[in-house]
Amino acid sequence: MKKKVVVGVTGASGAVYAKVLFDRLVELQDQIQEVGVVFSTNAREVWKLELDHSDFENLPFTIYNSNDFMAPFASGSAKYETMIICPCSMGTMARIASGVSNDLMTRAADVILKERRKLILVPRDTPMSLIHINNMKTITEAGGIIAPASPSFYSKPSNFEDLAKTVVDRVLDLAGFDLSSYRWSE
């Protein structure tokens, strides 16, 4: 069965993670029915700053305005199984943990949680305050998955994108995709 996925991108540092995630989703098109994308207000600016381009404008997926509450994944009836927010800012995480659905990203996360589907958040910030940790605990207790952007090195990545891929591939594993990736002791 092909997957319906929502990808949220916030203005947290780590645009390379979002770029690699989109690249991998393109590679996994045969497993995908639909990918809906929503960028926070600052996500595009951070992408341009960190990656020196605006290739996000050319994604082969439908991009929705952050205030478009008519987007299909704003309702549980659309049956999107998974939402990945990558990178996830601590502000977005706080709004999700508090149940504040003031934009399409937080509304979609709220829908995914209430429908008992898979919400995967990829925070990149460090250090974390007790507020951040408690928000992660709240989201985890509600059924969400916190997958920090902590790259692994045992695959000996040779550049930033390969390093980011160690996180993205783990996230895609959590989302249930069948992908070829570095596996420990294989």
Image (cartoon, rainbow, N blue to C red):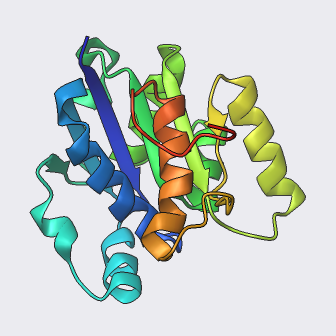
Assign the N terminus to one quadrant of the image.
top left
Where residue 135 appears, as percent x and y from the top left, is 75, 45
Where residue 85 appears, as percent x and y from the top left, is 47, 48
Vertical position of residue 55 compared to residue 185: above or below = below
Q: Quadrant of residue 90?
A: bottom right
Name the residue nearer the viewer: 66 or 175.
Answer: 175
Residue ID at (77%, 55%): 132
Residue ID at (25%, 37%): 28
In the image: residue 155, left or right of residue 171: right
In the image: residue 104, left or right of residue 159: left
Vertical position of residue 186 compared to residue 42: above or below = above
In the image: residue 161, left or right of residue 166: left
Residue ID at (38%, 49%): 8
Where residue 125 appears, as percent x and y from the top left, is 68, 68
In the image: residue 117, left or right of residue 66: right
| Residue 71 visible in this rendered orientation of the protein | no
Vertical position of residue 184 compared to residue 126: above or below = above
Assign the C terminus to one quadrant of the image.
top right
Residue ID at (23%, 84%): 53
Name the residue nearer the viewer: 45 or 161.
Answer: 161
| Residue 74 visible in this rendered orientation of the protein | yes
Vertical position of residue 35 compared to residue 59: above or below = above
